[in-house]
């Protein structure tokens, strides 16, 4: 049986941008190395210069890709498959009002129409955890002045994973995120959710610890 635990948290407003890792592949094109060697005069210095140039190019590409990402725009009440048989839908009624349903999605939407939603603070995130054995499904909402280009989820010291994002048409000032982490449970370490703007700057962050065994 699915168990949903919703964690609400106001978070710090925009902080300094976090660094993004880059991968650099060397080889094939030697033009950068040749040009660098002409400037530096030694093969070792030329290799260092070529690596620097390649890293700068990779960072520029990563920044451009991040700027191109963003939430998927969906219609009000539109059911979106988010993994593990769950559907997510965003409602225009209320504030940060959305549903996550495994059964009878239409009925869940009708019930939510009478709710005000989650009125979270500006530049903040909310978070929820749905667990079924070792399968984990993260869901939550963002309310930020800038639409996030990227939202990541990290469990403890594990890998940083990109969450999917949804928003309603126009500029509602909020949206949702979701991450299917099947097989990642049971959760025993701190979960960190971070939203980034198109320029890579950190917009908001949320950290919470999973509930102890037994859900208490």
Image: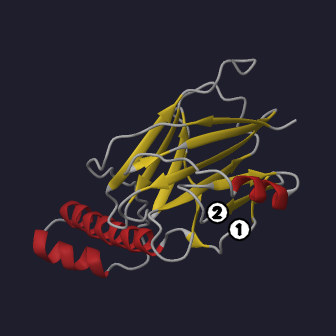
Q: Earlier in the sequence, mark 2 or mark 1?
A: 1
Q: Position of residue 165 (x, y in %)?
A: 57, 62
Q: In the rendered image of this protein, does residue 129 appear above or below residue 148?
A: above
Residue ID at (51%, 51%): 152
Where residue 71 appears, as percent x and y from the top left, is 54, 68
Q: Is residue 194 left or right of residue 115?
A: left
- Helix, strand or loop at label 2? It is strand
Query: In the rendered image, which quarter contains the N terminus?
Result: top right
What is the count of numbered marks?
Answer: 2
Position of residue 163 in the picture relative to residue 36 (left or right): right
Callout 2–callout 1 Cβ contact below 8 Å = yes
Q: Residue at x 27, y 69 (%)?
A: 50
Q: Quadrant of residue 197?
A: bottom left
> Which residue sits at x=73%, y=52%?
100
Residue highlighted by disc 2: 90
x and y percent of residue 143 in the render? 44, 55
Of 55 and 141, which appears nearest the observer?
141
Q: Please give the name of the residue rendered at 55% of the width and 27% of the height, measured from the top-left corner.
A: 209
Give the Cα separation between the discs numbered 2 and 1: 5 Å
Q: Is residue 212 left or right of residue 59?
A: right
The label number, if any, that marks residue 97 in the structure image: none
Q: Quadrant of the C terminus?
A: top right
- Residue placed under numbered mark 1 in the picture: 77
């Amino acid at each position: 049986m699915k168990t949903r635990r919703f964690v609400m948290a106001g978070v710090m407003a925009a902080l300094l941008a976090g660094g993004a890792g880059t991968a650099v592949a060397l080889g094939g094109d030697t033009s950068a190395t040749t040009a660098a060697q002409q400037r530096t005069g030694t093969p070792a210095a030329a290799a260092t210069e070529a690596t620097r140039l390649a890293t700068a190019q990779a960072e520029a590409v990563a920044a451009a890709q991040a700027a191109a990402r963003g939430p998927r725009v969906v219609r009000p009440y539109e059911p979106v498959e988010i993994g593990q048989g769950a559907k997510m839908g965003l409602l225009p009624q209320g504030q940060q009002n959305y549903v996550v349903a495994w059964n009878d999605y239409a009925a869940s939407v009708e019930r939510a129409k009478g709710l005000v939603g989650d009125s979270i603070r500006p530049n903040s995130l909310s978070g929820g955890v749905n667990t079924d054995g070792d399968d984990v499904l993260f869901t939550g909402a963002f309310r930020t002045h800038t639409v996030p280009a990227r939202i990541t989820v990290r469990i403890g010291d594990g890998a940083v994973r990109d969450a999917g994002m949804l928003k309603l048409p126009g500029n509602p000032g909020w949206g949702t995120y979701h991450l299917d982490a099947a097989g990642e449970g049971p959760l025993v370490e701190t979960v960190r959710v971070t939203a980034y703007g198109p320029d890579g700057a950190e917009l908001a962050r949320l950290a919470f610890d999973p509930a102890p065994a037994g859900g208490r």
